[in-house]
Image: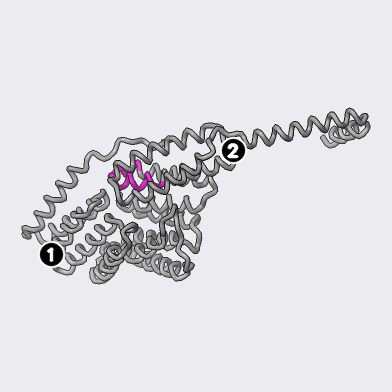
Amino acid sequence: MKRRKAVKLAGLALASPAAAAWVLEQAAADAREFTRQAEASALGSGTLDHLDLAVTEFNRAYSLKPPKAVFDAVLDYRRKVDALLAARHTHRQGRELFAFAGWLSELLAWLAHDLGDARAGLAFATDAFVHGQQAGHGQLCAWAMDAAASINLYEQRPRRALEAARKGLTEAPADHPLTVRLHAQAARASAADGDGEGFTAAFHAAEDAYRHLPPRPARCFGLDVAPLAEYALTSYPATSFIWLGQAEQARRHAEHALAAYEAAPEASRSPSREAIARIDLALAHAQLGDPDDAVALGHQALDSARVVDSVRSRAGDLTAFLTRRYPRQSSVEGLRERLAAADTAARPALPATPPGA
């Protein structure tokens, strides 16, 4: 090959000036065509900006609108991005489209979880992770695994939840609130598995990561994600101490979590997280021998504007514990009946199939 190239170059050097000029002119034409092909795209000039705005609005709507309505709208956009990926686009545009596809699937994972479909939720979380990898977007991959960790926990698969949290930590930036959250996810998964030492080690790692966060808050699609780290340091250990049977510790953390949720700006409020904090506090009161306050907090949780599947699941934990511990308490039966009605009203969840599944 080297010899052949040398002969060609020698031929160009020995050619007449006119022939050499013609060869170079053709080469320049080839270069212009290479450039045109590299820039060729079927995407409109404002497509990527539109997708950025859409994903931003979807994230803002997540805690404010009914999950089914948001799910349908996000899934429609996810399918549109899939079609754009199949059309002609530049390499740079492709990376951005892969990222938007991943962000939409990450949100769909949470929405499917809210609607009670763990299988769809985990499929979308995997899809988000894969598209994040294709986009070279480690933070997106980490967010996807954060969703997978939560979904697996609610499906009573603590070891898979722990695996997801650790997988996310390999992708998350060390100085990002997401790292705090993933360590706290690992702590919660350890507690769910009955591993007190694992909980303590992971929770200390979360606290240490929190101390090293930069003063300037991180943002994702216009939203401040720093509170997610703060919430994880209060609400996750509250749930964990419930599972570990340390009711006083659970009560203290649940009270702090509830205070933090109630003090959040309206745009950052999360009714479902607030409801779960109330249920954690209710469980702590129940374990400490106060069923009346536990039942009252349970009703307050079910008064939430966003009683999603995770809220109903934790309320089920509460009613099951109250029924075992206080079988003759009439107020417990009232809470059970209200939860049963909420479960009935929420079914069926969703008949969707994620793209590429």
Q: Is residue 328 left or right of residue 239?
A: left
Picture residue at 22% right of the left edge, 54% below the top? 304
Query: Which residue is disc 1 drawn over?
Result: 291
Badge 2: residue crowd in 10 Å (few <14, some 14–19, many ≥20): some
Residue 273, position in %: x, y?
29, 57
| The residue stretch that appears in magenta | 106-120
Along the viewing direction, whichever of 215 and 235 lies nearer the viewer: 215
**Callout 2, which amino acid?**
Thr
Query: Which residue is disc 2 drawn over?
Result: 90
Q: Is residue 150 left or right of residue 166?
A: left
Along the viewing direction, whichever of 31 and 337 lies nearer the viewer: 31
> What's the CA distance linking mark 1 and mark 2?
62 Å
Reply above or below: 246 against 50. below
Residue 214, position in %: x, y?
48, 67
User: Taken as a whole, is the magenta stretch helix, strand or loop?
Assistant: helix
Residue 145, position in %: x, y?
42, 51
Q: Is residue 356 visible?
A: no
